[in-house]
Amino acid sequence: MEILQIVGLGFVVTLLILIIRQQRPELAVQLSLTLATAIFLLILAKIQVILTVFRDLAEKANINQTYLTTMLKIIGIAYLTEFGSQVCKDAGEGAVAAKIEFAGKILVMTMAIPIIALVIDSIVRLIP
């Protein structure tokens, strides 16, 4: 199971970070970033499978690819925002993390405008 490998790797790196942080805090941050990159690379193939399934389902349901692409971008922004924010928090930069989260929220709202407009337009058409 891949999750056991990821969790095990996380535990090992966490222990190393706890040991290293006392003497070389800058190295601890780099080790944390390396772990984050390794985990991302391990799950990259799974992300591709998810994207393929979503595209196939959208095609079968005759959903406009533009809306599917927008939704996937929104999900991607949300995940990347959370990831970046957590990395900054791990490095002790809560203020930077908050700004990343704010930017992510604004980007999500900006990308969601066409979908919100479509939903509102559909509702207006249903009302006599």
Image (cartoon, helix red, strand yellow):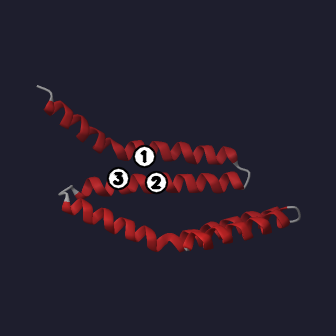
Q: Secondary structure at mark 2?
A: helix
Among the two numbered marks 3 and 2 on one chain, the one whose residue lies closer to the N terminus: 3
In the image, 71 versus 25, the foreground residue is: 71
Among the two numbered marks 1 and 2 on one chain, the one whose residue lies closer to the N terminus: 2
Among the two numbered marks 3 and 1 on one chain, the one whose residue lies closer to the N terminus: 3
Q: Which residue is mark 1?
A: 108
- Distance from Cα at disc 1 to Cα at disc 2: 7 Å
Q: Secondary structure at mark 1?
A: helix
Extreme residue in the top direction: 128
Q: Which residue is mark 3?
A: 71
Q: Quick one: label 2, few (<14), some, or many (20+) residues within 10 Å?
A: some
Q: Quick one: label 3, few (<14), some, or many (20+) residues within 10 Å?
A: some
Residue 56 relative to residue 111: left or right: left
User: Residue shown at 74%/70% (left/top)?
Assistant: 12
| Mark 3 in CB contact with mark 1 (< 8 angstroms) | no
* Percent x, y of residue 33: 66, 66
Residue 84 relative to residue 113: left or right: right
| Mark 1 in CB contact with mark 2 (< 8 angstroms) | yes
Q: Which mark is residue 34?
A: none
* Percent x, y of residue 46: 45, 70
User: Residue shown at 61%/43% (left/top)?
Assistant: 98
In the image, 45 versus 74, the foreground residue is: 45
- Distance from Cα at disc 3 to Cα at disc 2: 10 Å
Q: Which residue is mark 2?
A: 77
Q: Amino acid at mark 1?
A: Val
User: Residue shown at 79%/69% (left/top)?
Assistant: 16
* Percent x, y of residue 75: 42, 54
- Distance from Cα at disc 3 to Cα at disc 1: 9 Å
Q: Amino acid at mark 2?
A: Ile
